[in-house]
Amino acid sequence: MTRPPDPSSAVVDLSGRTALVTGGGSGIGRACVRRLAAAGALVHTVDVDAEAAKTVAEETAGYPHAVDLADRDALEQLPRTVDILVNNAGLQHVAALPDFPPERFEHLQRVMVTAPFLLLRHCLPHMYAGGWGRVVNISSVHGIRASPYKAAYVAAKHALEGLSKVTALEGAPHGVTSNCVNPGYVRTALLEGQVAAQAREHGIAEDEVVGGLLLKRSRIKRLIEPEEVAALAEWLCGPHTGYLSGASLPLDGGWTAG
């Protein structure tokens, strides 16, 4: 099946809003930065890769921030006057539970759970003061379902789902919504590394991983494009979603439908 058209045109007006996107230097994060900037938002691109953050920020007339999200002190350097927070940064490690390195498990939790929590503490006061805010958590189908060999990633995404719901409950009186976007397998550099790891784990070729393992439970047999995820993230910031909060929106080709 061919790729869908590139949904690059903005559908909402975010003029005057400020956004912060973690993991914004590549993949889904980069697509979100571009989409929000096209809608008129001033976007802060946060990435551990300084050059990637700089490149994307220059493309979108925004600001780059080279930050390791596992470093709690470094997060204090980021701006607080943010109306839209996109918690996107993530990483993967594939191993069976008896072989899973504890330090790697903990690192994934720091980046994908603790950092979003700290950024919420960092940014919510400004949103509350303004009576408006949007928190978009780029979760995963693995925030709803589990797969073997991905203990740290599945645990982190499930935790992010809970954090998003608490944010929705506490933010409601202040005009702040919080939702999760739950994509299946997206065509990103992170996925490429995952495919290679799965191939090694199962002793099969990489093309067999995509067709036989990754897309096995998806009814739509193609990878998702980063721009499709970004389009949904943008929609969640629009004028018709103020009553949508605490939700998890599957973008998974029917994976979780059956």
Image (cartoon, helix red, strand yellow):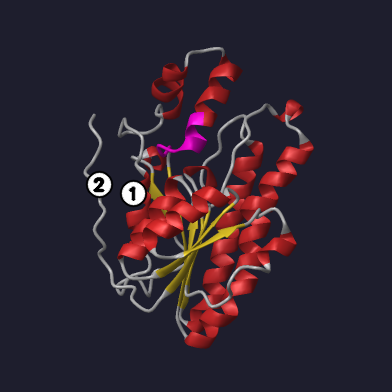
- Label 2 crowd (10 A; few <14 / some 14-19 / many >=20): few
**Badge 1: residue crowd in 10 Å (few <14, some 14–19, many ≥20):** many
The answer to whether residue 24 shows anywhere in this view is no
Asked if labels 1 and 2 touch by Cβ distance under 8 angstroms, the answer is: yes
* Nearest to the observer: residue 39 or residue 158: 39
Asked if residue 225 shows in the view, the reply is yes
- Mark 2 — residue? 6
Residue 227: image tag = 1
Which image quadrant is residue 210 in? top left
- Secondary structure of the residue carrying tag 2 is loop
Is residue 198 a member of the stretch shown in magenta?
A: no
Q: In the displayed structure, does residue 111 sit left or right of residue 52?
A: right
**As shown in the figure, which amino acid type bears the numbered disc 1?**
Glu
Task: Identify the image quadrant of the C terminus.
Answer: top left
Vertical side of 95 occupied by 42: above or below:
below
Residue at 33% from the left image edge and 49% from the top image edge: 227
* Residue lying at the far right of the rendered structure: 102
Figure quadrant of the N terminus: top left
Q: Position of residue 172 (x, y in %)?
A: 49, 78
As shown in the figure, which amino acid type bears the numbered disc 2?
A: Asp
Asked whether, in this view, residue 75 is left or right of residue 248, the answer is right
Tell me the quarter of the picture where residue 216 sits.
top left
Q: Secondary structure at mark 1?
A: helix
Decide which of tag 2 and tag 1 comes sooner along the chain: 2
**Magenta stretch, residue numbers:** 185-192
